[in-house]
Image (spheres, rainbow, N blue to C red):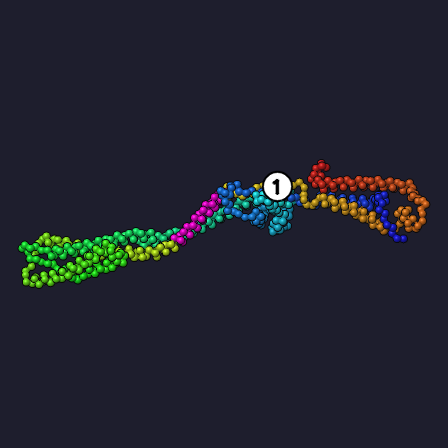
Amino acid sequence: MASQPIPMEPKYIIDLIIKRRWILMVPFFIAMIVGIVLAIKLPKIYEASTLILIQPQRVPQNYVQPIVESDAGERINTLSQQVLSRTNLEKIIKDFNLFKNGEHSMFMEDMVGNLRKRISVNISTGRRRENDAFSISFQGQDPESVMRVTNALASYFIDENLRLREAQAVGTSDFLESELQNMKSRLEEVEAQLKRYRESYMGELPEQLNSNLQILDRLQEHLNESQQNLSEAKVRLAALQNTGSLSRETTVIIAQDPQRESNDIGQMRAELDSMLSRYTERHPDVVRLKARIAEMEKQAASGQQQSTTTSANSRSRQTAPLSAEYRIQYTEILQEMKRLETDIADTRAQIANYQKRVENTPKREQELLSLRRDYQNIQTTYDSLLERKLEAEIAVNMERKQKGEQFRIVDPAKLPQKPIKPDMRKLFIMIVGAGLAIGGGIIFLLEFVDNSFKRPEDIEEDLSLPVLCTIPRIINQRAKRMIRLEHISAAVFGFISLVLFAGFTFLTQLGVESTLGLLK
């Protein structure tokens, strides 16, 4: 006979559960025991976390510009690498005596790796930069150690951030100081070059051009005046030579040197050519110089004639001594002429020197322009570096006084009350579901393989014959006692299962410590 289908009527299912209650209660009882054991024996992992707010600098940026600028996420990642370094984690392991139960069976590398995996840093960035924050979480089996380690990690982050910002600010300040010293050395070098150049070409500098031109004009006027005075002295000397003492003295005519007179006239003509290159022929100095040249030429011609006559007469007559006054005047005129000639030569040398200075001024101006351009560029760079250096020093003081961007703990880590691992709710659902599913599965399997008729309707459907009546099972006294004993045993066993279920529920919902506290 084929297996009969299992009816899905509620009354039949309830009767089936009552009938096969032991098959359902035993797996459930075992499941509760297993669940309680797991709830007590499984290692509890607690987690503590702290929230740290990134607080912007307290001094307005209009007054102090920060020199430590970086993205919050990048800076936190950098700090995480430093805080989670092996050196720092080894210090945490020793300070908080972590892994005390298994420190002899684990290498330090394994302990550091295990500790690093249990630490997590989560960044939560707001819409505005001043709302940036991040959280630090740590997991462990000891709630108090978890709380202490989390707070210690937060302190490490805050201290490391202050140290890192100060180090960056000081490093920037030192770099600017080094560059400032280099630029100062270059500036002093260019200043020394300018100084040496000005000392080497003093008198040819562009700012001295007007002064040189004025001096050149004065020297030219002085030269003209000296030449005029020399011409007048020569005229006086000629007049003195033509005038002699008539009483008791023989006329003595002192002849001038024709070669010297010719040289003076040549110089005056050269001076005339120089003046004509600058002035017109109607200029007073040009007219006066022409008249003087003509007069000198006349005197030269008359002097040569008188010298010839005097030379012839001197042979026939005895020379008479000159008077003292005549000799004094003659000597004075000669000395004056000598002084004027020396002065004219000196003046011409000075004129040539100043003309050379004026001619060299454009060249010096170009060379000075190049030196000044380099000096100005270096000076501008130096001033910029000096300004940045002062700003960097202010920023360093701001960081040292902790007025810059800081990390502030908003929610410190607290002692965790409930473990996050294992998940007791999931464990409760899995154990209860497994106990009921095993019992229900066995019942379903037994019913599925049972090929007997389960209801009168099944007989009618299978045999197509009506069922007139059903005869219940006849139970004797001994069977009744066994049934009653079985009912009592089932009730006791069910009560124990319910107690275990209640205990498992408390363990998973309140925790082991709270449940033990309720029992006490």
Q: Is residue 432 left or right of residue 207?
A: right
Q: Which residue is mark 1?
A: 413
Coordinates of residue 362 in the picture (x, y in percent) = 34, 56
Residue 490's image quarter?
top right
As rendered, which of 75 and 420 lies closer to the eye?
75
Q: Residue at 66% of width from left, 44% of height from top? A: 46
Check residue 220 for magenta coloring.
no
Let me know if residue 88 appears in the view. no
Q: Magenta-highlighted stretch: main secondary structure? A: helix
Q: Position of residue 409 (x, y in %)?
A: 58, 41
Q: The disc labelled 1 sits on which kind of residue? A: Ala
In the drawing, does residue 191 fall left or right of residue 130? left
The residue located at (85%, 42%) in the rendering is 486
Residue 386 among magenta residues: yes
Element marked by disc 1:
loop
- Quarter holding the C terminus is top right
Q: Residue at x 86, y 50 (%)?
A: 5
Seen in the picture, residue 505 relative to 202 is either above or below; the reply is: above
Specify start and end residues of the magenta stretch as a single range: 372-398
In the image, farthest residue toward the right: 468
Taking the image as shown, residue 336 lies to the left or right of residue 119, namely left
